[in-house]
Every structure is written in C-alpha cells, then in structure tokens.
Image: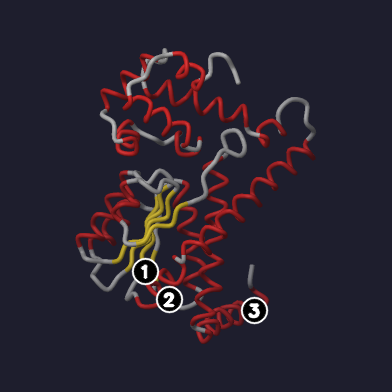
C-alpha cells in the first residue's frame, strides 16, 4: 500500500468516532459509487454531518471531499487486476480479452443480482398489468431505454419512449394511476429523469428505477428499484460496462414475459412475417 494512501493517512492521525465511521464507509464503497457520491450521500450513509466530512478531508490533507474521493478512486484503479491487465505494452488481442472478460463479469453479476433479489416477478407483473409503460432516460441512459422499448413493443405491449426531453416531460405529466414509468439514471439523480419520475409519482403511476446507486434519490422514490452491479473493472469504463450489463435486461424481460404470457410471442412472429425478406 502506498505510504501516502488514504488508508495510511487515516491511520496516522487521531480520528473522532464520527470521522472513523466516515473512513470506514469510504473504504467500503466501490469506486463505481464513489465517482457519483456527494457530501449529502456520504453524510446519510455514515450518519455524520457535512462539517465532519469537511473536517476529515482537511485532517487527511485533502482540500475537500472532491479531492479525497478522487484520490480513493485512483487508488482503487491502481489496485484493480483488469486495470493492470490493459496497462503497459499489452497488445490489442490482450485488450480485447480484458474488455470482453469485464463485460462477461458484469452481465453475470447483474444476472445473479436479479435472481437473488426476486424483483423480476414483480416487474413482469407490472409490465403486463399497466395500461401504458413509459420509459424515461437522458444521455447514454436513453440508449438503454430504446433497447428495452424495442423489445417490449415487439410483444404488443403499450409502451412509449422518446429521447426528446420536453416530450418526455409532456408524456410524464399525462400519466395516470394505471400506468408504469421506468426511469433510467446511472447516478440516480439526473435532473431531467428525476423530473419525469416526480411527475409519475404525482399522477399515482407505478415507478421502476434502473440505477447504479441504490441509495440515490431516484431509487428512494421508486416502488421497485433495480441496482446495477458495482465495482471498477476497466479504467474509465465502469458506467459503460454497467450499461452494457443493463442492456441485457431488455432480453431478460422479453423472455420472462413470453414465459408468463406465451400468446404474446405471436406478436413478435407476426412482425418477422411482416418484414419477411425486406427485413434489414
């Protein structure tokens, strides 16, 4: 361990009980979550005041939480085996293997989480009983919404998605208690997505969150929350890999719905027949 690492710094100074608890929380938080953590998030997790967090940062030699968090993330990246596997003079073949291994690990981890959580039964029930399913996401999260939309619409479900922000807000404002909103935000705090989530809640609609932060505002607001697997795997790629893993959710839902309602598979077959040889 580096002599100037976060853990070494914490061991060299006398810490109050509240500060020690903050240190323990920070050491237990994956780099994936550290990257999006705010002082409010840490305060809630450690049951410590923001002033205690600021005092700890200065005591350890960091100007503030932002710098302390950055140092921790860089330390985790340096310790990560996959990070090391693509550093130095590795060839492109080794890089390809490292990336695909990271992708496989993430999708497997997400699948195991879904199996353990028991959330799929509830989500499928909600999808099949909703009058309308609306997907909301911004930026890269919109790509995941689009993937889920394209799979669900093939089954004949009443589902809507548009990338345009104002139209998303318009659709959210017209929701009813019979509808279901699926809101996607990696941080769980994207302003545009939170706006649609709050509108859905005001309408009494069901709310499902797909996020990388289990304690985020979006997750807390939702009836059902699916949390992406955490942990740093490749330098600068945690969010991308998590979104690839989450993209698998579209196919999982497709297959689960067919299992529950085999008759809906005929809608997908009908679409294939409609395109025929003209299918691109």
| Mark 2 lies on residue | 157
Give the image location of residue 142, x and y in percent: 44, 52
On residue 276, the disc is: 3
Give the image location of residue 171, x and y in percent: 29, 62
Q: Nearer the viewer, mark 1 or mark 3?
A: 1
- Mark 2, secondary structure of its residue: loop
Question: Which residue occupies the foreground of this view, 218 or 231?
Answer: 231
Give the image location of residue 221, x and y in percent: 28, 54
Looking at the image, the residue that sits furthest to the bottom is 263
- Real-space CA distance between mark 3 and mark 2, rounded to the nearest whole angstrom: 22 Å
| Mark 1 lies on residue | 133
Q: Are marks 3 and 2 in contact (CB under 8 Å)?
A: no
Q: Are marks 1 and 3 in contact (CB under 8 Å)?
A: no
Which residue shows up at 50% across the image and 38% down it? 30
Looking at the image, the residue that sits furthest to the left is 202
Which is more N-terminal, label 3 or label 1?
1
Q: Residue 13 vs residue 245: left or right?
A: left
Question: Which residue occupies the foreground of this view, 181 or 115?
Answer: 115
Which residue shows up at 53% across the image and 71% down it? 254
Which part of the image, by quadrant, shows the C terminus? bottom right
């Amino acid at each position: 361990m580096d002599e100037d690492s976060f853990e070494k710094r914490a061991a060299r100074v006398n810490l109050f009980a509240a500060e020690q608890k903050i240190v323990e929380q920070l050491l237990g938080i994956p780099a994936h979550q550290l990257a999006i953590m705010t002082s409010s998030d840490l305060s809630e997790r450690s049951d410590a005041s923001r002033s205690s967090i600021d005092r700890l940062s200065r005591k350890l030699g960091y100007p503030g939480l932002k710098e302390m968090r950055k140092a921790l993330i860089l330390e985790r990246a340096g310790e990560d085996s996959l990070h090391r596997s693509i550093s130095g003079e590795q060839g492109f073949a080794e890089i390809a293997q490292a990336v695909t291994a990271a992708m496989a690990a993430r999708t497997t981890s997400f699948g195991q989480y879904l199996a353990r959580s028991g959330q799929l039964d509830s989500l499928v029930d909600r999808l099949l009983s909703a009058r309308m399913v609306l997907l909301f996401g911004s930026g890269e999260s919109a790509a995941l919404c689009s993937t889920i939309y394209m799979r669900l619409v093939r089954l004949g479900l009443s589902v809507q998605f548009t990338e345009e922000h104002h139209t998303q807000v318009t659709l959210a404002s017209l929701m009813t208690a019979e509808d279901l909103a699926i809101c996607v935000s990696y941080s769980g705090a994207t302003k545009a997505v939170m706006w649609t989530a709050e509108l859905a809640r005001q309408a009494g609609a069901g709310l499902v969150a797909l996020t990388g932060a289990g304690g985020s505002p979006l997750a807390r607001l939702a009836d059902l929350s699916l949390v992406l697997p955490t942990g740093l795997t490749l330098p600068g790629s945690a969010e991308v890999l998590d979104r690839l893993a989450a993209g698998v959710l579209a196919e999982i839902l497709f297959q689960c719905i067919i299992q529950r309602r085999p008759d809906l598979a005929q809608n997908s077959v009908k679409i294939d027949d409609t395109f025929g040889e003209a299918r691109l």
